[in-house]
């Protein structure tokens, strides 16, 4: 887990322990295994070369199987996994940029995005603790649930359903004969993806190489998807929590100022015209403004870390959903493969929905920040509070928006558009071909 530590920065043993623990609780080991936060620089380089070789092999399979139209199942499966490898290549190519900002996010969470001083009254403090405790329960429940679902899907798709589909039974002679006049490559139908390899896989050493290489590819891609999705859920939940706390502190600013006044001067506020009380109000407001600035810095790190992966997910999502749907309803595909791709379909929808949901939630909560100054109880202190109200409103007039590459906003509208596009592609294929 030393990969989370910044080079050239000296940490105490306690700081190292806290950083590693934060990274671990956000499922950081998946990022390490998937080479997004590599322990060794050679790891992402190796994976890029490995994915590139398999990208070529699968692309060649797509070419072959589309020539012989009756092999729709193999063609669709090869195309689907070609898209997945394309995504993995994009993710791995962005490794060092993603790793840089994830380190920033982990460090901010370990040290605290923002820590209020004496300007928080006991009642507001209790509310903050309740909000944070609820967030942590929700965050870990979601992360653990998605982890179980994705890993179960992976086991089903690469082990259980291929057995049901008959992939591990030697029945490839007819297929080999069918393609013998097209290629000298040899068919391997006993691996995760049926395909033709540029070497003879009928002998056990090379068959073992083909088998293990495909499963390494599957496991490494699973680690990438688990790592990005699960860590994103954790970091995004913390982002939402910080915005909620900011909104609460702004709404309770008068109550906080009363508490600060009592703590400083040992008596209750007797008049709202008291200059000392005005100073306490300003101090509380400045604290909230600093917190909002810290939230924006955290949001920028979150945006920079996940912008490129989310863009890839959204751009390829519609086509991958379409291909999963085509295979699932095809009459030429047996039930084992249909079940396999049904789970791919559900997993892909979940994958896209995670980013859309948190994009929508961050946008909604930050939009609420614009209205919170109205709830301050400012009527009797308008002269003091008005400049701060205007400043906060001008800064929050544009809500925070998670985006994919700065091009596409992550929202329920985007999720709907992706699903709608997938359905349109599906209908187009249905009209153009009998599958």
Image (tube, rainbow, N blue to C red):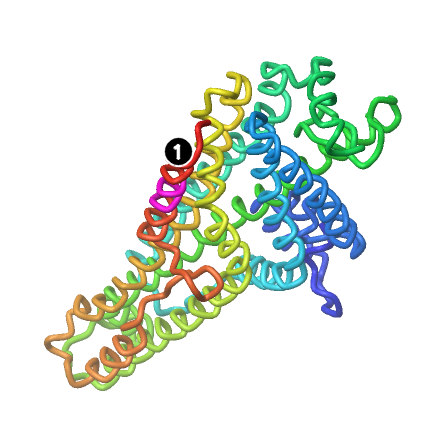
> Over which residues does the magenta segment extend?
420-425
Answer with left or right where residue 114 lies relative to residue 100: left
Q: Nearer the viewer, residue 237 or 10?
A: 237
Q: To which residue does mark 1 refer?
A: 430
Above or below for 260 versus 156: below
Q: How many marks?
A: 1
Q: Nearer the viewer, residue 305 or 279?
A: 305
Rendering coords of residue 424 (x, y %): 35, 43
Answer with left or right where residue 216 lies relative to residue 252: right
- Give the residue at x 22% y 66%: 372
Res. 274 image quadrant: bottom left
Above or below for 52 versus 154: below
Q: Nearer the viewer, residue 410 or 336?
A: 336
Rendering coords of residue 403 (x, y %): 43, 61
Residue reaching furthest to the left: 379
Rendering coords of residue 337 (x, y %): 55, 22
Rendering coords of residue 316 (x, y %): 50, 49
- Give the residue at x 23% y 84%: 387
- Give the residue at x 81% y 37%: 198
Res. 64 image quadrant: top right
Answer with left or right where residue 176 lies relative to residue 305: right
Counting other residues with Cα less than 10 Å from the Cα at mark 1, is it few (<14), some (14-19), or many (20 or more)? few
Which secondary structure dominates the residues rendered in magenta?
helix
């Amino acid at each position: 887990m030393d990969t989370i530590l910044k080079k050239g920065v000296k940490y105490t043993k306690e700081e190292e322990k806290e950083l590693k623990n934060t990274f671990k609780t956000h499922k950081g080991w998946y990022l390490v295994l998937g080479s997004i936060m590599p322990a060794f620089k050679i790891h992402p380089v190796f994976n890029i070369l490995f994915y590139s070789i398999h990208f070529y092999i699968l692309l060649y399979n797509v070419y072959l199987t589309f020539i012989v139209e009756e092999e729709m199942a193999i063609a669709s499966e090869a195309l689907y996994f070609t898209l997945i490898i394309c995504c993995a290549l994009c993710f791995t190519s962005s490794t060092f940029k993603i790793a840089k900002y994830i380190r920033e996010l982990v460090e901010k969470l370990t040290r605290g995005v923002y820590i209020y001083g004496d300007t928080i009254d006991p009642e507001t403090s209790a509310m903050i603790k309740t909000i944070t405790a609820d967030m942590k329960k929700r965050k870990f429940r979601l992360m653990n649930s998605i982890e179980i679902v994705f890993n179960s899907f992976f086991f089903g798709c690469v082990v259980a359903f291929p057995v049901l589909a008959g992939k591990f039974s030697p029945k490839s002679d007819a297929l080999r004969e069918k393609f013998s006049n097209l290629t000298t490559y040899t068919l391997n139908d006993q691996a995760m993806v049926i395909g033709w390899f540029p070497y003879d896989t009928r002998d056990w050493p090379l068959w073992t190489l083909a088998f293990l290489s495909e499963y390494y590819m599957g496991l490494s891609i699973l680690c990438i998807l688990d790592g990005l999705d699960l860590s994103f859920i954790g970091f995004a939940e913390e982002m939402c929590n910080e915005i909620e706390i900011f909104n609460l502190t702004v709404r309770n600013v008068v109550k906080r100022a009363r508490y600060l006044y009592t703590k400083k001067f040992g008596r209750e506020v007797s008049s709202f015209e008291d200059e000392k009380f005005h100073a306490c109000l300003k101090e509380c407001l400045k604290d909230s403004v600093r917190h909002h600035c810290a939230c924006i810095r955290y949001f920028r790190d979150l945006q920079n870390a996940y912008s490129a992966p989310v863009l890839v997910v959204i751009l390829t999502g519609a086509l991958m959903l379409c291909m999963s749907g085509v295979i699932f309803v095809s009459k030429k595909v047996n039930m084992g493969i249909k079940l396999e791709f049904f789970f791919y379909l559900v997993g892909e929808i979940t994958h896209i929905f995670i980013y859309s949901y948190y994009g929508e939630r961050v946008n909604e909560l930050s939009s609420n920040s614009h209205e919170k100054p109205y709830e301050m109880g400012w009527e009797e202190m308008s002269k003091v509070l008005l400049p701060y109200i205007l400043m906060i409103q001008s800064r929050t007039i544009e809500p925070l928006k998670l985006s994919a590459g700065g091009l596409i906003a992550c929202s329920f509208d985007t999720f709907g558009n992706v699903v709608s596009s997938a359905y349109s592609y599906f209908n187009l294929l249905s009209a153009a071909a009998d599958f």
